Amino acid sequence: TALRVVADLGYYTLDNLPPGLFPAFLRLEMENGFRYKHLAMIFDTSTQAKVIELRGILKLMKESGVPINLIFLDAENEKLLQRYSETRRPHPVYDPFLDRSLADTIERERLILAPLHQSASIVVDTTLFTVHDLKRTLTDFISRLQSCPISSVFLVLQSFGFKYGLPSICDLMLDVRFLNNPYFVNELKELTGLDKRVFDHVMGDPEAKELESRFYDLLQFLIPRYVREGKSLINICIGCTGGKHRSVSLVQALLGKLSFKGVTVTSMHRDVER
């Protein structure tokens, strides 16, 4: 599903490519003058050896100055079990000699993929996503990549609603449920923080402006130090009750101000359409 979304954005796509064939593909592309400006690939990562091989290739490409980004899609175990049950497709990593159940396979796969998870440009938790949520998130991320220089560090500002559960991936969380809630204003209730009327209502509150200023100062202090420690992906999560008004507005306010050398700042709004 993700690959189809990216293909619709004009990327040439390859599915389930063995890492060992990637260098040969790149050589062919070079010989043909790089026919495809944008490439998107799903790699075969069904064994630890293939993951190690892929990491080596990605490292070599980055050292060679090739602009590359790794998108890692994740979900909670219960949701993965449900999805496999619904699709009735076998898990590609299943081994009858090692796994007593599908849950064992998923846990073993997590261990195999852990190095890629840690080095990803962005990790997308799809547990609560619909197909439309996934399309919106990937489209937003990729469109921002194309409009700014490629960097090795990504700062993701994510809004969410506490009523739908906490994000599974978060380095720093801010609860903004104390701010005045546009949900109780009839003409704003069905809108979101992406609408100027809601944004102005939320950020027009002196407490919201002070929160933005104080949190901005905290991030100005923290982010360079996270980068210094070698973090390539920094997830900042901002939550309100439903994830549609206050958290979205604050993310948008910060998105327009935050800028760090060598860091690409992007946004995600997990629950904005719920």
Image (spheres, grey):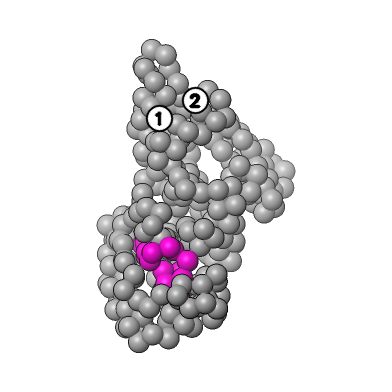
**Residue 196 screen position, x and y as percent:** 55, 79
Q: Are marks 2 and 1 in contact (CB under 8 Å)?
A: yes
User: Which residue is at the front of the view, 237 or 60?
Assistant: 237
**Residue 198 screen position, x and y as percent:** 50, 78
Q: Give the distance between the C-alpha atoms of the residues marked 2 and 1, in whole angstroms.
A: 8 Å
- Mark 2, residue position: 91
Q: Is residue 252 magenta?
A: yes
Q: Is residue 261 magenta?
A: no
Amino acid type, residue under disc 2 in the picture: His
User: Which residue is at the front of the view, 49 or 192?
Assistant: 192
Residue extent of the magenta highlight: 235-253
Residue at 59%, 47% (x, y): give it: 131
Residue 212 appears in the figure? no
User: Which residue is at the front of the view, 224 or 83?
Assistant: 83
Marks 2 and 1, the one that precedes in the sequence: 2
Query: Left of 205 or right of it: where is 172?
Result: left
**Residue 220 screen position, x and y as percent:** 32, 73
Residue at 31%, 62% (x, y): give it: 173
**Residue 251 vertical placement versus 109 (above, below):** below
